[in-house]
Amino acid sequence: MVKNNGIKIFKLSCISSSLLFLLSCSSTPTTDIQSELVSPTQWQSVLTKYQDTSPLLSDNIQSDKLKALINDALVNNLELRSQALNLQKAEINLKRAGMALWPDLDFKVDASRGNRNGISNSFSLGLTTSYNLDIWGKLSDAEKAAQLGYQKAEIAFLQTKNNIVSQVANAWFDLVAAENFYKLYEQRTLNVKNNLDIIEQGYQAGLNKALDVYLTRSDYEKEQSRLISQQQQIENASRKLSLLIGGYPDKSITSDFLFKQVKVSVPKGVPAEVIKARPDIQLSWLDVLIDDAELAIAHKNRFPKFEIRASISDEESKVSNLLKDGLWSLAAGITLPILDSRNLKSAEETAQLEFQQSELAYLKTTYEAFHEVETTLTQIDVLDRQKKHAVSQKENAVIAEKLAFEQYLNGLVTYATVLTAQNRTLDAEIQLLELNKNLVVNQISLHLALGKNWQSIAGTEINE
């Protein structure tokens, strides 16, 4: 008898010691991965001279039609609508996680009628409730993970908004550029037609050669063919824009915009602080926090589970007699995993590795964000410097073309010289137009790379 008592005392001591040990290890350390992040105090690009306190890209792209198209896309874009449903699902999951903290309550009612030794009726009623005591905070960790999951869905929805608005703006400027190119080619066609009229008149007067007439006619046909091709580019850009808005790929959308002097601006601030608003960095950080919570859950799954149960039940031949002398019970229990302990330990080790992977993914995402910003800043700087030369190039080409045609009319140069001068002017105008477009497109990329939201693309007047 004494021996049995000693064994019981030993078992209780072991269990108590185990519980105390587990209680002392019931929390896992939080991440300190941000201390490993190496961040510069300022951007390396020379564009820092353009730093502004709070620049809005709308200063460069003021267009009521673009704002209206963005509003339509925010309402009708199919990808955005699908992402909104994901947000609703995350909200439902959050509510479900919160319900885990409440007791379980089951209510059961049965009625039967039999004819074994005469007709008899039987009615039964039972009510059972159970509650898991969240001593280790495992359920709280699960709710925390669900809350972080909902935050991820919110940020993913914002990221989708940013991407859709960026795509709409880029498609819009593809359309703007296509229409601007069409106007340029249209003016070029008109100029060649005027030249052709003058040369044909000179040929009829015996002043010009037949070769010049045929060369000019060939040039005129080439410009007309270019107009037809450019019209197709306009229709393609319009259809792409219509598709992004969430409707039929219509070719009838037109722009109301001409590229003007593009202002270059860079938000002030320490790089690491500036890019914190980027959705991809926020999502990556939430992944770290979620995996941290999942690690805590995996760790606490190895602990005993405490449960309180209560029930009341009765069975009578009449409904009116139910619960008059019903049976009830109240119990508490503890469950400690033994045979499954190795599996639970492996699950915790896996969760630990996944947590470390999410930390490394956060560092990778942050450094890639730095790379994206630095690369875009450099690209804008290159485009800005190229544009200064392109402006001078266009001015000189226009003057040279005018002089070449005047000298041709005076018999000083051949028409080949005129064609060369015309091509140089056209090349200069095309290059300047492309530089203006690329400057605006890269400004959009820069704003998103710096964590600016979709409203900064076309101004705060955009409706959500």
Image (spheres, grey):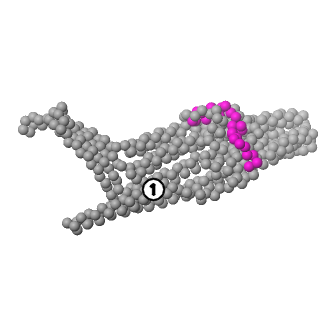
Q: Which residues are magenta?
A: 48-74
Give the residue displayed 55% in from the left and 51% down from the top: 285
How packed mark 1 is, by other alpha carbons closer than 10 Å (few <14, some 14-19, many 20 or more), is some
Give the residue displayed 89% in from the left and 41% down from the top: 403
Which residue type does callout 1 highlight?
A: Ser
Picture coordinates of residue 35, whole percent (x, y): 59, 57
Picture coordinates of residue 166, whole percent (x, y): 62, 41
Res. 125 visible in picture: yes
Q: Is residue 316 left or right of residue 451?
A: left
Identify residue for label 1: 27
Number of numbered discs visible in the structure rendering = 1
Rendered image quadrant of residue 348: bottom left
The front one of 210 and 164 is 164
Res. 142 visible in picture: no
Picture coordinates of residue 123, whole percent (x, y): 18, 36
Rendered image quadrant of residue 61: top right
Rendered view: 275 above or below 258: below
The front one of 253 and 269 is 269
Q: Is residue 90 magenta?
A: no
Q: Which quadrant does the N terminus fall into?
A: bottom left
Q: Secondary structure at mark 1?
A: loop
Picture coordinates of residue 255, whole percent (x, y): 68, 33
Give the residue displayed 93% in from the left and 39% down from the top: 410
Q: Is residue 58 magenta?
A: yes
Rendered image quadrant of residue 36: bottom right
Q: Is residue 326 left or right of residue 19?
A: left
Q: Is residue 355 left or right of residue 257?
A: left
Q: Is residue 160 left or right of residue 27?
A: right
